[in-house]
Amino acid sequence: MKSKKSKFLDKCYDRVYAGDMTVFEECFTPDYLLYIPETQMMTDSGYLKGKFALEFLSTIIRNDGLNFDRTIETVGEVEQGDTVVREILYKMKRNPNKPTDMKDNEYPPDFTVTIRLLNMYKFRNGKICEESTFYNILNTEMDFCGRDLKKAVAKILRMEPMMKEAKAMLAKGKLPPMGSSPQSKK
Amino acid sequence: MRSARSKFIDTTYERVHGGDPDVFTECFTPDFTYRGPESKMMSPDGALHGENAIRAMYSFNNGDKGSWGKVEREITVEIEAENRLFRVMRWTAKNPYKSYAGFDKLPVDMKVKTEVFILYTFRDGKICDEFFAYDTLGYFIDMAQGDMKKAAAALSNFAPMMENQKASGAGGEVQFPAFPAKK
């Protein structure tokens, strides 16, 4: 049986993942704070704030959907007071009809990467005011490279210029272009 | 005010880190599963199981203690419901005194902070599952003081160690040595 907050999260994030940014005013506090591995790598502060933060998150998630058949499944949940924690399986399955940004890797037809992550959502006055996510980027890159750490490291180094560019854009309050999230520029 | 379960976790992991050979049967279910960044590199299914998982934790903790002058753990968030307890832990390591994780030398005054999310699941009053999440890459970049190339070089040095350890598992889960006998 899902709690009221859990159902609220489902509805909000379905809209976020679909790119519906009208969700921000309805479901998030104006000072909403996003703290995920990507914001840690791409900002000096480690986080993004407000509607811009949600736009950034939506861009990353939709971007993965351009390259893969993506599913997001909540497999565990803990709720106490104004905090909800979700254990999520984020699956990306190759779709040969989605060739975007797959130029320098040849994945087998059934290639699938599953990321297990923990999301913590904090609420204030019935709206989401903070979101923190933890997953292991290094292990994810190893999954993309057949569990080869050296190949994963080489790929991370190839991503460095893109990360710097994204960081510079975010510092100016601009979203990095679609196709530039860590999970798509392989 | 900390809950009974929260205190149970603290005392249990103190015993794990202290190498208490009785802690597994007393505090963990026989099918206990540990899933974390390290286990993903050491096991075909990405998890360590049973008493071997506890031995691994003891070994990881000793590795940290043997390389850093001081390691501190601070719980910054804790929530609990039914059979699960979630924690955010701030792990701080200071004053490295020897080569570590592929870095030949780290500045002696270095201080590295890492946030860790941990989800414990209980069954019949014992811990049956632990999911431990942190950003390994971010940790290496912090140790490299923001220099991604240095972080990558350390990871490349680290790769053969990981490969050797994985090979010792002969296609199965890497096995960790038993705790030292009680004195």
Image (cartoon, coloured by chain):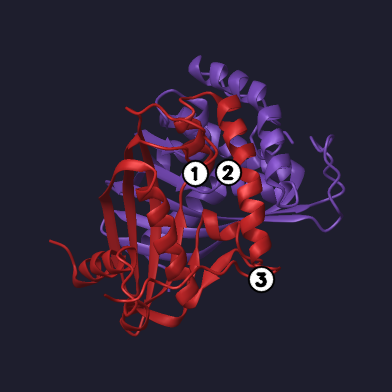
Chain colours: A purple, B red
Question: What SS does tag 1 mark?
Answer: loop
- Hey, what amino acid is under mark 2? Ile
Percent of width and height locating residue A84: 36, 57
Question: What SS does tag 2 mark?
Answer: helix
Q: Is residue B44 left or right of residue B85?
A: right
Q: Assess whether mark 3 and mark 2 are in contact (beta carbons under 8 angstroms).
A: no
Which of the pair A151/A24 is nearer the observer? A151
Q: Which residue is mark 2?
A: A137
Q: Which residue is mark 1?
A: B135
Question: In the displayed image of the protein, which residue is found farthest to the left?
Answer: B1
Q: Earlier in the sequence, mark 1 or mark 3?
A: 1
Q: Quadrant of residue B106?
A: top left
Q: Residue at x 49, y 17 (%)?
A: A171
Q: Assess whether mark 2 and mark 1 are in contact (beta carbons under 8 angstroms).
A: yes
Q: Is residue B151 left or right of residue A79?
A: right
- Hey, what amino acid is under mark 3? Gly
Mark nearest the camera among 2 and 3 is: 3
- Mark 1 and mark 3: span between their CA atoms? 25 Å
Indicate whether B68 appears above or below B79.
Answer: above
How packed mark 3 is, by other alpha carbons closer than 10 Å (few <14, some 14-19, many 20 or more), is few
Give residue B172's mark.
3
Give residue B60's mark.
none
Residue A72 seen: no
Mark nearest the camera among 1 and 3 is: 3
- Mark 2 and mark 3: span between their CA atoms? 24 Å
Which of the pair A134/B177 is nearer the observer? B177
Q: Is residue B102 left or right of residue B21?
A: right
How packed mark 1 is, by other alpha carbons closer than 10 Å (few <14, some 14-19, many 20 or more), is many
| Chain ID, mark 3 | B
